[in-house]
Image (cartoon, helix red, strand yellow):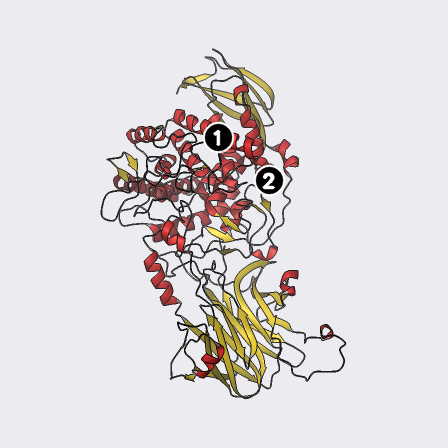
Amino acid sequence: MKRLKHGLTIAISSWSPAASAPEEARSAERRLRPGERLAFGEGGRYHAGRIDVPAAGTMVLLCRSPRPLRIWLERMLVLDEDIFWRSYQRELRAAIVLPCRKGSYDMLVEFGPRPRHPEGIDRDCPSRNRERVMREIARRRPDVLELDGEVVPGAEAPAVSIRFLPAQFVRNGTTYQHVMVRRVSGAFREPPGLSCWSPVERTEEAFRLFGSVPPGAVIEGTSREEREHGWFRFYVPVADPAFCLPPVRDFGPEKRAEPEVEIAGFCGLTVEGERGSATVKMPVFESLGRCAPRHEYQEMRWPQFEEAWPRLPQPVLPEEWKWMSELYRAAWEMLFGLARHPAPESGLPGPYISTGSGFKFHQFVWDTSFTAMATAYGHQAMPAYASLDVLYSRQFDGGYIHREHDVRDGLPALYEPDFSPNPPIMSVAEWAIYRLAADIRRLRAVYPVLKGNHIWLRFNRRLPDGTYWTTGLANGLDNSPSLGEGYPCLTAQMAHDAEMLGLIAGELGMEKEKREWMAERDEIAEALNRRLWDPRVQIYSTSLRGGGHNPNKVVTAFWPLWAGIVPQERVAALARHAKDPSSFWRHHPLPSLAADSPHFRPAGDYWLGSTWAPTNFAAIKGFQRSGRADVALDIILRHLRCMYEVWKDTGKIWENYCSEESKRGSWSMPDYCWSAAGPIAGLFEVVLGFEADAARNTLRWRPPCREGCGAANLPFGDGRVSVILRAAGHEPVIETDSNRSLDLEVEWRGAMHRLAVRPGRRSCRLNASSQSGAV
């Protein structure tokens, strides 16, 4: 970075205690002692002070504050800045550029409250780590105003205030960073004149910005609304292909208290006008997404639903299941309706499927991951990787990916203090797409990102007993009474993630890494089964610091099934819980909290009893993987039927559902992305029984014993295949229609039949000649 030449130092000579009114603050002003800081006080909202300018010219004041504030110099407003409470930066960094005379300036500072998370978070979403985090935030962000000033003698730069923002984007290989600029009104050099019929005819002095990093030219991106409020937005080059921003951290334990975007260095930002210029020392923040497959914004054509519909696979269902086709179509129509195109300067790499109609500005990790498991079936008709690429583009150096991002600037959004990583299931989503698309280049591109995220969790969420801890917001269960030490959900997810990474490494020819991942998966599985199984209740539950387990039965108890790490005798116990009408087998199974918990709310109240698509999908896939396809089928048929009844009544697919009747959950938003997982992926994989392995050119099928079921136009690698059971008798007939050759393995009544599918329309009778052995 270019070092800045410093002018003459401006001194802060006095500072008052906090006061409730400006004049009260001015009357209490006192001289600062050597080394004394500008501390914000209690009992008021104003401080008064004085700054001493050693020469005439242009003053440059660099400001850093943990509170929103306004600053007046000689009763002229020179800075007016808020701090958004959802920003992990928890501070503002700004500069004041102002032509000045030599002498003393009266200063008045008005300040607001420090940003803080909502009180309900401490009540409903407690954390074992919160007190430590809040102490560390207070230590790292002392309640003081930092003002560092210098004067450039003889210069007359334009009078402006500049807000430095951590938002960045990449264009043509150059990294740009956002700054907001506002003219300082009242900083007139000339007396009132005679030439204007109206004040609006006054011409304000033009200003220009230049960066010290090539290409130097600053791009203006001011919106109409910003201009109407007197703001200008600029994009300053801070790195180019010849000078990349260095990593600010490596893998290891976090030294930050929260996922703030740290400063990687400084560059020069020059403000120039007709009479002169001044250069400001501009902080350059770290870049996100260093290992992401896509860094630069790329506009892509996202088809409309009606255009894409003929290219999407179609379930073939018997008459008694035809209603599922309506829900299936509604799910796809909802997903296409949720496609969003962010601003190219947001830092996001392109369009994506948004979380839901009620989440205009925020995108979540596990919501997006479950959605990708559904859109995998549309990978030939839509950009199936686009939403996952948004997540990867937000990864910090060191591997961390935050649970939620503001899509306006791509920055992590605060809702609870601390790091808040969502379930690490992006690898599961990538593997699901790979099974259908067989794109090895994609696995090669995303493996470093997925590996980094897993390593961050291993360093920062692993407990000494080998289990993993999380929080209610991080694991996505918000107000669920699941607090404890080791959590079955994250522990199982880490085992599952290790397995997926091992499978990906194997596909990439990294056999040593594959063995290491699989060994880690086994270690995590051992820790989970040793520490998080409650032998009294016969269920997985959060461990407690003093011993024992959380007494509440939470739906994530079933998550270890999906990871494939549950001993068979425990699978049976979990199946009994799932089918227990007093517990989880409600009208709409499986409620987020068992109905026999004292905290259960029949209306749902979010995670106190609502039935949720992602946890149902995890449990359904888990029972299927663990040899209880009967339980998986029972759950998904009830789940889809209740979803269908609510959709028929409301015309919407909801964020969550009431477990006691076919209604939306009491706290639920419509048009929610992840609820498509059941009607699409669950329908093909569990109800109809398809399992694609396009990389090995094999499609496995366990058809339900119903005539007239199957799939048409199923994407398989770069081809498509239709497979339909036409006659279900002693020797059923399988009809195929494919544009490529593949192997079809059909499991039928305890026997496996292997069929060589050739291009075109074919039919085959399942009999002894097609049978290859007992299952």
Inter-mark Cα distance, 2 to 1 = 23 Å
In the rendering, at what x and y percent does residue 429 appear? Answer: 47, 40
Q: Earlier in the sequence, mark 2 or mark 1?
A: 2
Left or right of residue 565: residue 749: right
Left or right of residue 581: residue 146: right
Give residue 594's quadrant in the image: top left
- Please state which amino acid type lies under the numbered disc 2: Phe
For the point 41% across and 54% down, which residue is it?
416
For label 1, the crowd category at 10 Å Cα-Cα, with few meaning under 14, some 14 to 19 and many 20 or more, is many
In the rendering, at what x and y percent does residue 167 appear? Answer: 53, 61
Q: Is residue 511 visible?
A: no
In the rendering, at what x and y percent does residue 588 appear? Answer: 43, 31
Return the residue nearer the eye: 221 or 672: 672
Return the residue nearer the eye: 521 or 177: 177
Q: Quadrant of the C terminus?
A: top left
The residue that disc 1 covers is: 642
Q: Which mark is residue 336?
A: 2
Are dots 2 and 1 in contact, CB under 8 Å?
A: no
Residue 727 in the image: above or below residue 258: above
